[in-house]
Amino acid sequence: MHKGREAGRARSRSRVPLRRSLLGRLLGVSALVAACSVAATAWLAVQTTSGAIRQEQGRNLTADARIYDTLLGYAARNPTWNGVDATVRKLAEESGRRIALTTQSRQPLADSATAEVPPPLPPQASAVVDPLSVDAVLAARSTEGQGTAADRIDPRAVGPFLLPAAERTELRQLAERHAICLNRSGIAADVVVGPSGRPRIQMVGSAPERVLSTKCESFDLDAPTRTERKALDALNGLADACLKRQGREGVRLDQNLFWGEDIAVTRPGQLPYPVPSDARAARPAPVAEAPREFTGEDDRAIASCVGTARSEQLGSYVASPALLFIGDEGGATVPGFDLSPANTAKIAGAAALVLALTVGASVLAGARLVRPLHALTGAAQRMRDGEESASVPVSGDDEIARLAAAFNDMSAHRARLEEQRRAMVSDVAHELRTPLSNIRGWLEAAQDGLADPDPAFVSSLLEEAVQLQHIIDDLQDLAAADAGVLRLHPEPVRVGELLGQVAAAHQARADTAEVTLRVETADGRLPEVAADPVRLRQAVGNLVSNAVRHTPAGGTVTLRAYGGGAAGGGAGPRSESGSGSVSPTGHGSEGGSGSRGGNGSEGGSVSGGGSGFPPGDVVIEVADTGTGIPAEDLPYVFDRFWRAEKSRSRRTGGSGLGLAIVRKLAEAHGGTAGADSTEGEGSVFSIRLPGPAPTP
């Protein structure tokens, strides 16, 4: 067995393999994190660089969209590209880019290049500038664009719908009068002029029903002008011709280019565009005949024909499609990111350097982390092998230092428990040996004829047997309490009556010791407690017996009880004058004592009166005017077989288990036991019991 134990020690003290050690895992995690970081950084650098170069090739998509939108507006307002050179050069100067326009057959229209021989244009154009077929992506990114209609016709291409100056002035006056009327009615309104020159009323945060409730009529403003009616008739004829070619009936378009019997509200900031009949706001048409029903297929065919008619009508009013080229002034293009072997080697070298630094830092940090853990492991193994426990050094205030401090506390506590265990075994053996030795001695004397078995002889043997039985019963009670199997039979108990019974049981002993024993209760104001009366009398009796034993002749032992919210007994003044006390969270080993006051780690105590207890609890106190307990001994008096006066024997100082039993019985009832003492003045022992549960 000894060899097996030595082999176990050798295995436990051997080095943990690196792959299973904390240091190895820390290195692995650090290396993995470093590799992932390097890879992510390299990928991010490649992506960022490539994106930056692509952005450099196109300079800026938003700026390109602005260039596109400006040229698109020029094409929508002019039938040819004549005179666009000034616009192109201005845009090139603002953006620092080369801008070129060509026909679809690549015939130059305008070029901002300053060289006598312009560099060749790239094979692919940046965009096609066509007001009748707008690039939706570029138009959406433009900061100055007007948006696009559903048929992709630029809203600035108005063609024959462009109002002459006279009609503009007349409509402007009507719009301003209408806006003034709305403003007077409390509706914020302003006049906005569209691409065709037609003004419209723009309202801010007003519901349509508010406008209808005013007397501000806008029928004259909404009515089409002569120019618009003429253009609308021409557009209607082109659309009807398209529908007739498909075998469909013609439609009548209104000013907003809607068909059918409903009229929708014009979209703000845009020229109206064809909208299916099922998407328009209802308004009755001023016709007598029955409304015509349109199916979804009819709406799609009409919308297609209206779009075709608009393109045909506007074709002569807008510039022809042109190719737009946006690039560098010199015509050169910036090459993309080329991950060449040299670049690859640089990235790999940087990654290796970062990885090496990470591993090095991890080794240093891991060594500092593992060193105290090794010390803790060695100390724990020495404790397991039964060697004398030794504390580990504590440095710093980090988690490892706190773990080492907790280990040191645990080691010291274990050493105290081991010492108490050994002392308890020795004390138990001593306490049992004394009565047994006496019994054996008397019996051997009787056997040898040296003593007569008279009544005095039998009484002496009985007394020793009773003492032995008392020790065994106390040990059995403590063992049951420690195991949690101590049986209680709770019933309603009147504390005052119970204290009177205990005092009566100990009155003879008190009279023999010339000690006054008295009871002070307010039983009429005390609630009944649910307790085992036998066990509670045992606990209080232990306290009274202990108090009588340590009170000199002429002294007083007082039993009192009061509620948790009331003022307590005399412990409070002694505490203020330098008394020692142990709180419910006090320290000390488990157990009890035959001497005075204190508590262990499992017990609870209260110094002073009842103010420290929750309202509704009941406090039982046993106060004496004895010698008191030194403050340094107070934390240990509840330890089993512990005596403040080492010279006391079982006959003069009790068995050393009485207070331990008091504490265990109090805890079994859900309460606590404690003590308060002033050396030379006396001590107060208390038992707190929970009061009855409040009735709902």
Image (cartoon, rainbow, N blue to C red):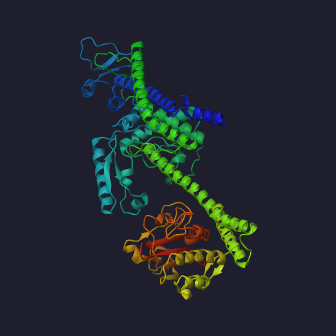
From this viewpoint, which residue is outermost toward the top? Answer: 117
Q: Is residue 181 above or below residue 345?
A: below
Q: Quadrant of residue 19?
A: top right
Residue 558: horizontal and vertical position, in percent? 51, 82
From this viewpoint, which residue is outermost toward the bottom? Answer: 524
Write the residue at 57% across / 50% down: 291
For the N terminus, which image quadrant?
Answer: top right
Q: How many labels, in total?
A: 0
Nearer to the camera, 157 or 112: 112
Q: Quadrant of residue 312?
A: top left
Write the residue at 53% across / 76% down: 549
Nearer to the camera, 52 or 34: 34
Position of 460 with respect to 518 (left or right) is right
Nearer to the camera, 355 or 636: 636
Residue 321 shows in the view: no
Q: Is residue 99 above or below residue 380?
A: above
For the C terminus, which image quadrant?
Answer: bottom right
Position of 32 with respect to 189 (left or right) is right
From this viewpoint, which residue is outermost toward the front? Answer: 449
Q: Quadrant of residue 165?
A: top left
Write the residue at 36% across / 46% down: 225
Nearer to the camera, 630 or 215: 630
Residue 396 shows in the view: yes
Residue 63: horizontal and vertical position, in percent? 33, 30
Residue 305: horizontal and vertical position, in percent? 51, 35
Write the residue at 59% across / 60% down: 427
Residue 25: horizontal and vertical position, in percent? 51, 32
Q: Is residue 420 above or below residue 239?
A: below
